[in-house]
Protein backbone atom coordinates (compact mmCIF):
# COMPACT_ATOMS: atom_id res chain seq x y z
CA UNK A 1 0.00 0.00 0.00
CA UNK A 2 1.33 3.40 -0.99
CA UNK A 3 2.29 5.84 1.76
CA UNK A 4 0.05 8.94 1.83
CA UNK A 5 1.42 12.03 0.18
CA UNK A 6 3.35 13.93 2.92
CA UNK A 7 1.67 17.13 1.83
CA UNK A 8 -1.77 15.60 2.35
CA UNK A 9 -0.75 14.20 5.73
CA UNK A 10 0.43 17.65 6.78
CA UNK A 11 -3.03 19.00 5.94
CA UNK A 12 -4.75 16.21 7.86
CA UNK A 13 -2.58 16.96 10.91
CA UNK A 14 -3.27 20.69 10.83
CA UNK A 15 -5.48 22.08 13.67
CA UNK A 16 -7.48 23.94 11.05
CA UNK A 17 -8.71 20.61 9.64
CA UNK A 18 -10.34 19.48 12.91
CA UNK A 19 -14.13 19.68 12.87
CA UNK A 20 -15.20 22.83 14.67
CA UNK A 21 -17.39 20.85 17.08
CA UNK A 22 -14.37 18.72 18.07
CA UNK A 23 -11.86 21.57 18.27
CA UNK A 24 -11.45 22.17 22.01
CA UNK A 25 -8.70 24.72 21.41
CA UNK A 26 -11.12 26.72 19.28
CA UNK A 27 -13.88 26.51 21.88
CA UNK A 28 -11.48 27.82 24.54
CA UNK A 29 -10.71 31.03 22.62
CA UNK A 30 -12.07 34.34 24.02
CA UNK A 31 -14.08 34.92 20.82
CA UNK A 32 -16.05 31.72 21.53
CA UNK A 33 -17.28 32.86 24.95
CA UNK A 34 -20.86 33.36 23.66
CA UNK A 35 -20.87 29.76 22.44
CA UNK A 36 -19.58 28.47 25.79
CA UNK A 37 -22.25 30.45 27.61
CA UNK A 38 -24.92 28.94 25.39
CA UNK A 39 -23.58 25.43 25.96
CA UNK A 40 -23.65 25.91 29.74
CA UNK A 41 -27.26 27.04 29.47
CA UNK A 42 -28.36 24.22 27.17
CA UNK A 43 -26.59 21.16 28.55
CA UNK A 44 -28.32 21.14 31.99
CA UNK A 45 -31.56 22.43 30.48
CA UNK A 46 -31.78 19.53 28.05
CA UNK A 47 -30.83 16.93 30.66
CA UNK A 48 -33.35 18.19 33.23
CA UNK A 49 -36.08 18.44 30.62
CA UNK A 50 -35.36 14.86 29.55
CA UNK A 51 -35.94 13.78 33.17
CA UNK A 52 -39.09 15.96 33.35
CA UNK A 53 -37.65 17.98 36.24
CA UNK A 54 -39.41 21.34 36.13
CA UNK A 55 -39.93 22.09 39.83
CA UNK A 56 -37.16 22.22 42.41
CA UNK A 57 -36.22 23.24 45.93
CA UNK A 58 -32.79 24.82 46.19
CA UNK A 59 -30.65 24.39 49.29
CA UNK A 60 -27.63 26.64 49.90
CA UNK A 61 -25.18 26.55 52.80
CA UNK A 62 -21.58 26.33 53.93
CA UNK A 63 -19.11 23.80 52.58
CA UNK A 64 -17.44 23.82 56.02
CA UNK A 65 -20.30 22.53 58.17
CA UNK A 66 -19.46 18.86 57.79
CA UNK A 67 -20.98 15.77 59.35
CA UNK A 68 -20.06 15.17 62.99
CA UNK A 69 -17.32 12.56 62.48
CA UNK A 70 -15.39 14.74 60.02
CA UNK A 71 -15.57 17.86 62.19
CA UNK A 72 -14.63 15.95 65.31
CA UNK A 73 -11.56 14.60 63.52
CA UNK A 74 -10.60 18.14 62.49
CA UNK A 75 -11.07 19.27 66.09
CA UNK A 76 -8.79 16.48 67.34
CA UNK A 77 -6.03 17.53 64.95
CA UNK A 78 -6.34 21.24 65.73
CA UNK A 79 -6.37 20.52 69.48
CA UNK A 80 -3.18 18.50 69.14
CA UNK A 81 -1.48 21.29 67.18
CA UNK A 82 -2.54 23.97 69.67
CA UNK A 83 -1.38 21.90 72.64
CA UNK A 84 2.00 21.28 71.02
CA UNK A 85 2.78 25.01 70.99
CA UNK A 86 0.55 27.21 73.19
CA UNK A 87 2.25 30.31 71.74
CA UNK A 88 1.19 29.47 68.19
CA UNK A 89 -1.61 32.00 67.61
CA UNK A 90 -2.53 30.53 64.22
CA UNK A 91 -3.05 27.09 65.76
CA UNK A 92 -5.16 28.58 68.56
CA UNK A 93 -7.25 30.48 66.02
CA UNK A 94 -7.78 27.38 63.89
CA UNK A 95 -8.97 25.50 66.97
CA UNK A 96 -11.32 28.33 67.93
CA UNK A 97 -12.86 28.41 64.46
CA UNK A 98 -13.27 24.64 64.44
CA UNK A 99 -15.10 24.82 67.76
CA UNK A 100 -17.49 27.38 66.29
CA UNK A 101 -18.18 25.02 63.40
CA UNK A 102 -18.76 22.15 65.81
CA UNK A 103 -21.37 24.31 67.54
CA UNK A 104 -23.23 24.44 64.21
CA UNK A 105 -23.09 20.70 63.54
CA UNK A 106 -26.86 20.42 63.88
CA UNK A 107 -27.30 22.27 60.60
CA UNK A 108 -25.82 19.32 58.66
CA UNK A 109 -28.32 16.94 60.21
CA UNK A 110 -31.20 19.38 59.77
CA UNK A 111 -30.38 20.07 56.11
CA UNK A 112 -30.39 16.33 55.55
CA UNK A 113 -33.76 15.99 57.32
CA UNK A 114 -35.26 18.92 55.42
CA UNK A 115 -34.22 17.42 52.08
CA UNK A 116 -35.64 14.07 53.17
CA UNK A 117 -39.02 15.72 53.89
CA UNK A 118 -39.00 17.57 50.56
CA UNK A 119 -38.06 14.42 48.65
CA UNK A 120 -40.82 12.37 50.27
CA UNK A 121 -43.27 15.04 49.11
CA UNK A 122 -41.63 15.06 45.68
CA UNK A 123 -42.06 11.31 45.36
CA UNK A 124 -45.74 11.61 46.23
CA UNK A 125 -46.38 14.47 43.79
CA UNK A 126 -44.67 13.54 40.56
CA UNK A 127 -41.27 14.89 41.56
CA UNK A 128 -42.55 18.39 42.11
CA UNK A 129 -39.83 19.28 44.62
CA UNK A 130 -36.51 17.90 43.41
CA UNK A 131 -33.64 19.00 45.65
CA UNK A 132 -30.90 21.08 44.00
CA UNK A 133 -27.59 22.06 45.62
CA UNK A 134 -24.22 23.37 44.56
CA UNK A 135 -23.02 19.79 44.61
CA UNK A 136 -20.15 20.25 47.05
CA UNK A 137 -19.47 19.15 50.63
CA UNK A 138 -21.01 20.36 53.89
CA UNK A 139 -24.62 21.53 53.81
CA UNK A 140 -24.86 20.73 50.11
CA UNK A 141 -23.82 17.14 50.75
CA UNK A 142 -26.34 16.89 53.58
CA UNK A 143 -29.21 17.97 51.32
CA UNK A 144 -28.28 15.60 48.49
CA UNK A 145 -27.91 12.89 51.11
CA UNK A 146 -31.40 13.52 52.46
CA UNK A 147 -32.87 12.93 49.01
CA UNK A 148 -30.75 9.81 48.59
CA UNK A 149 -32.00 8.51 51.95
CA UNK A 150 -35.49 8.08 50.47
CA UNK A 151 -34.37 6.92 47.03
CA UNK A 152 -35.18 10.16 45.24
CA UNK A 153 -33.03 11.97 42.66
CA UNK A 154 -31.26 15.23 43.41
CA UNK A 155 -29.27 17.71 41.36
CA UNK A 156 -25.76 19.08 41.91
CA UNK A 157 -24.43 22.17 40.15
CA UNK A 158 -20.65 22.16 40.63
CA UNK A 159 -18.39 25.06 39.69
CA UNK A 160 -14.75 25.01 38.58
CA UNK A 161 -12.59 26.75 41.19
CA UNK A 162 -8.87 27.50 41.60
CA UNK A 163 -8.69 24.74 44.21
CA UNK A 164 -9.91 21.33 43.16
CA UNK A 165 -13.56 20.55 43.87
CA UNK A 166 -15.33 17.22 43.70
CA UNK A 167 -19.05 16.49 43.72
CA UNK A 168 -20.40 14.88 46.84
CA UNK A 169 -21.30 11.18 46.45
CA UNK A 170 -25.05 11.56 47.05
CA UNK A 171 -25.97 13.43 43.85
CA UNK A 172 -27.79 11.49 41.13
CA UNK A 173 -24.87 10.92 38.69
CA UNK A 174 -26.73 11.93 35.53
CA UNK A 175 -27.96 15.10 37.28
CA UNK A 176 -24.55 16.42 38.31
CA UNK A 177 -23.26 19.27 36.14
CA UNK A 178 -20.07 21.29 36.12
CA UNK A 179 -20.03 25.00 35.31
CA UNK A 180 -17.33 27.49 34.45
CA UNK A 181 -19.56 30.57 34.61
CA UNK A 182 -21.10 31.55 37.94
CA UNK A 183 -23.84 33.48 36.13
CA UNK A 184 -25.15 30.43 34.26
CA UNK A 185 -24.95 28.31 37.40
CA UNK A 186 -27.00 30.88 39.32
CA UNK A 187 -29.55 30.97 36.53
CA UNK A 188 -30.01 27.21 36.71
CA UNK A 189 -30.44 27.37 40.49
CA UNK A 190 -33.43 29.66 40.08
CA UNK A 191 -35.05 28.73 36.76
CA UNK A 192 -37.21 25.96 38.23
CA UNK A 193 -37.11 26.94 41.91
CA UNK A 194 -40.27 26.65 43.98
CA UNK A 195 -38.39 27.57 47.17
CA UNK A 196 -34.96 28.56 48.38
CA UNK A 197 -33.67 27.42 51.79
CA UNK A 198 -30.45 29.12 52.89
CA UNK A 199 -28.52 27.48 55.71
CA UNK A 200 -25.62 29.24 57.45
CA UNK A 201 -22.75 29.95 55.10
CA UNK A 202 -20.14 32.43 53.96
CA UNK A 203 -19.43 34.57 50.91
CA UNK A 204 -20.76 32.08 48.35
CA UNK A 205 -23.96 31.42 50.25
CA UNK A 206 -24.57 35.12 50.84
CA UNK A 207 -23.86 35.90 47.18
CA UNK A 208 -26.45 33.34 46.08
CA UNK A 209 -28.95 34.61 48.67
CA UNK A 210 -28.67 38.23 47.55
CA UNK A 211 -28.82 37.29 43.89
CA UNK A 212 -32.24 35.74 44.55
CA UNK A 213 -33.36 38.62 46.78
CA UNK A 214 -32.46 41.18 44.11
CA UNK A 215 -34.35 39.27 41.43
CA UNK A 216 -37.38 39.00 43.70
CA UNK A 217 -37.19 42.66 44.74
CA UNK A 218 -37.20 43.70 41.07
CA UNK A 219 -39.83 41.12 40.02
CA UNK A 220 -37.41 39.45 37.65
CA UNK A 221 -38.23 35.93 38.80
CA UNK A 222 -41.15 33.85 40.04
CA UNK A 223 -42.53 34.39 43.54
CA UNK A 224 -40.97 31.85 45.88
CA UNK A 225 -40.38 31.56 49.61
CA UNK A 226 -36.81 32.48 50.54
CA UNK A 227 -36.15 30.87 53.90
CA UNK A 228 -33.13 31.86 55.97
CA UNK A 229 -32.53 28.81 58.11
CA UNK A 230 -31.09 29.54 61.56
CA UNK A 231 -32.45 32.92 62.63
CA UNK A 232 -29.76 33.49 65.25
CA UNK A 233 -26.99 33.08 62.70
CA UNK A 234 -28.55 35.12 59.94
CA UNK A 235 -29.68 38.06 62.05
CA UNK A 236 -26.03 38.57 63.01
CA UNK A 237 -24.51 37.78 59.61
CA UNK A 238 -26.97 39.86 57.53
CA UNK A 239 -28.84 42.66 59.29
CA UNK A 240 -31.72 43.28 56.90
CA UNK A 241 -33.58 45.37 59.48
CA UNK A 242 -30.62 47.76 59.56
CA UNK A 243 -30.85 48.18 55.78
CA UNK A 244 -34.55 49.00 56.07
CA UNK A 245 -34.00 51.42 58.96
CA UNK A 246 -31.29 53.18 56.94
CA UNK A 247 -33.65 53.55 53.98
CA UNK A 248 -31.44 51.38 51.77
CA UNK A 249 -34.31 48.93 51.16
CA UNK A 250 -38.07 49.27 51.62
CA UNK A 251 -39.82 47.93 54.69
CA UNK A 252 -41.79 45.70 52.32
CA UNK A 253 -38.54 44.10 51.18
CA UNK A 254 -38.23 42.49 54.60
CA UNK A 255 -41.21 40.33 53.62
CA UNK A 256 -39.13 38.69 50.88
CA UNK A 257 -37.57 36.42 53.52
CA UNK A 258 -38.83 34.15 56.26
CA UNK A 259 -36.92 32.43 59.05
CA UNK A 260 -36.99 28.81 60.19
CA UNK A 261 -35.21 26.89 62.91
CA UNK A 262 -36.41 23.35 62.29
CA UNK A 263 -36.81 21.26 59.12
CA UNK A 264 -40.53 20.94 59.82
CA UNK A 265 -40.92 24.70 60.18
CA UNK A 266 -39.10 25.32 56.89
CA UNK A 267 -41.22 22.74 55.11
CA UNK A 268 -44.44 24.23 56.50
CA UNK A 269 -43.45 27.69 55.24
CA UNK A 270 -43.08 26.22 51.76
CA UNK A 271 -46.39 24.39 51.91
CA UNK A 272 -48.23 27.50 53.13
CA UNK A 273 -46.70 29.89 50.60
CA UNK A 274 -49.34 31.36 48.24
CA UNK A 275 -48.56 30.35 44.67
CA UNK A 276 -49.09 32.61 41.68
CA UNK A 277 -48.18 31.37 38.22
CA UNK A 278 -45.37 33.47 36.76
CA UNK A 279 -42.57 33.14 34.19
CA UNK A 280 -39.45 31.26 35.09
CA UNK A 281 -36.46 33.15 36.46
CA UNK A 282 -34.71 35.60 34.13
CA UNK A 283 -37.06 34.92 31.20
Image (cartoon, rainbow, N blue to C red):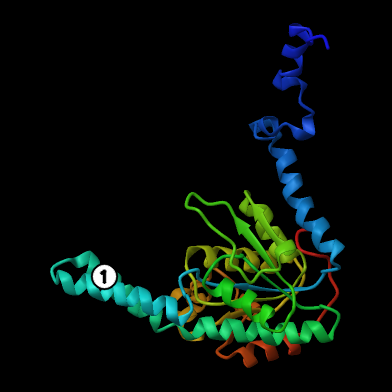
Report the quarter where the N terminus lies. top right
Q: As rendered, which of 32 and 274 lies closer to the eye?
A: 32
Residue neighbourhood size for the residue with mark 1, other residues' Cα within 10 Å, grouped as few (<14), some (14–19), many (≥20):
few
Would you identify the image quadrant in which residue 13 lies? top right
In the image, residue 218 lies at what x, y percent?
70, 64
Q: As rendered, which of 242 and 95 lies closer to the eye?
A: 95
Whether residue 89 is situated above or below residue 200 in the rendered picture: above
> Is 37 on the left or on the right of 200, as rendered?
right
In the image, residue 174 lies at what x, y percent?
74, 62
> Is 22 on the left or on the right of 246, as rendered?
right
- Any part of residue 234 in sight: yes
Give the residue furthest to the front. 1
Would you identify the image quadrant in which residue 129 lies? bottom right
In the image, residue 61 lies at what x, y percent?
54, 72
Residue depicted at 80% across the width and 57% down the height: 45
Count of marks overlaid on the render: 1
| SS class, disc 1 | helix
Would you identify the image quadrant in which residue 153 lies? bottom right
In the image, residue 29 lies at what x, y percent?
65, 31
Residue receiving disc 1: 93
Report the quarter where the C terminus lies. bottom right
Q: As rendered, which of 37 and 160 lies closer to the eye?
A: 160
Whether residue 169 is situated above or below residue 274 in the rendered picture: above
Whether residue 201 is situated above or below residue 4 in the rendered picture: below
- Any part of residue 218 in sight: no
Residue depicted at 58% across the width and 91% down the height: 262
Amino acid sequence: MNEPDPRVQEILDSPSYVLAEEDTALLARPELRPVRLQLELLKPEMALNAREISSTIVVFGSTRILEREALEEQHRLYSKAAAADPRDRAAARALERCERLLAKIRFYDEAREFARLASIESKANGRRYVVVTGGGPGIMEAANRGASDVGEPSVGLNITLPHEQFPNPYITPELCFQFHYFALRKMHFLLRAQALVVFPGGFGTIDELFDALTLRQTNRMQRIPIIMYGRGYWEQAVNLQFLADEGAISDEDLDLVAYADTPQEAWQLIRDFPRIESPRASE
